């Protein structure tokens, strides 16, 4: 039993670390693939990796992975967009999106885990879309509040304008969230077939 626990803890750390690293890569993917900047708008993969983490790891580990990613960045590692990091990131208007990843991964995993042990692909897709919606809801509202309270707002800034900025990445994030919902069930079930998983899942 003790050996099983050690193995599962090692697997936990591996999966959490992997998705934290993927989030860092997803934040700066255009640095290695500049062709992913379309119309001046960088096509990041953070929302995709976030909901994928929730779908594959479940609500607990998915949220932990996103928390680890956030903390690594806050303590100075250049893992946020444009290779930024540090506690100064908290006051940036876009920091709400980083916070939202924790809740988005949790909600994604929670919806899937309510599928009675064998959730359908449709449930996975619904869960990843819901996670994406949480990402947009928290991130955009944080951005609006930031510009209203402490950040220098663009001329004519309004709540409607804040949401209009999200129209550009929305189709990309919907498509990638659906893809995450399609590709994650097999990995999800493989992890949960391990004997150690059932001992320690929350």
Image (tube, rainbow, N blue to C red):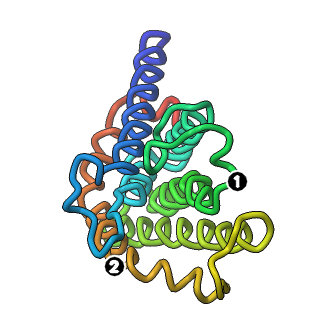
Q: In which quarter of the image is the C terminus?
A: top right
SS of the residue under disc 2: helix
Dot 2 surroundings within 10 Å: few (below 14), some, or many (20 or more)? few
- The percent coordinates of residue 165 (x first, y second) are 49, 80
Give the mark toward the camera: 1 or 2. 1
Q: In this view, does 195 lie to the left or right of 1?
A: left
Q: Is residue 128 left or right of residue 135?
A: left
Asked whether the viewer can see residue 156, the reply is yes
> Which residue carries the number 1 mark?
91
- The percent coordinates of residue 56 (x first, y second) are 37, 48
Position of 60 relative to 116 (above/below) = above
Residue at the extreme right:
149
**Res. 14 image quadrant:** top left
The one of 191 and 92 positioned closer to us in this rendering: 92
Q: Which of marks 1 and 2 is nearer the N terminus?
A: 1
- The percent coordinates of residue 139 (x first, y second) are 59, 66
Q: Is residue 169 left or right of residue 131?
A: left
Position of 123 relative to 171 (above/below) = above
The one of 157 and 119 positioned closer to us in this rendering: 157
Q: Residue 171 carries which label?
A: 2
What residue is drawn where x is 41% and y is 72%?
Answer: 126
Give the alpha-carbon distance from disc 1 to disc 2, as whole Å: 28 Å
Q: Is residue 166 left or right of residue 182?
A: right
Position of 191 relative to 6 (above/below) = below
Asked whether the viewer can see residue 202, the reply is no
**Res. 30 image quadrant:** bottom left
Q: Which mark is residue 121?
A: none
What residue is drawn where x is 70% and y is 53%?
Answer: 91
């Amino acid at each position: 039993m003790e050996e099983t626990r050690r193995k599962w803890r090692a697997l936990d750390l591996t999966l959490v670390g992997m998705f934290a690293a993927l989030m860092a890569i997803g934040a700066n993917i255009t640095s290695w693939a500049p062709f992913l900047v379309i119309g001046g708008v960088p096509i990041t993969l953070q929302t995709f990796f976030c909901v994928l983490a929730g779908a594959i790891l479940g609500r607990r580990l998915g949220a932990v992975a996103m928390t680890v990613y956030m903390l690594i960045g806050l303590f100075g590692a250049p893992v946020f967009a444009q290779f930024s990091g540090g506690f100064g990131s908290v006051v940036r208007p876009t920091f709400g999106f980083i916070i939202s990843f924790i809740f988005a991964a949790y909600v994604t995993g929670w919806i899937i885990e309510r599928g009675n042990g064998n959730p359908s692909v449709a449930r996975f897709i619904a869960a990843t879309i819901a996670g994406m919606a949480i990402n947009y809801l928290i991130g955009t509202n944080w951005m609006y509040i930031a510009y209203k309270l402490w950040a220098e707002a663009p001329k004519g800034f309004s709540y409607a304008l804040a949401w209009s900025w999200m129209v550009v990445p929305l189709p990309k994030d919907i498509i990638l969230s659906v893809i995450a919902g399609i590709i994650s069930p097999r990995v999800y079930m493989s992890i949960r077939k391990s004997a150690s998983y059932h001992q320690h899942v929350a």
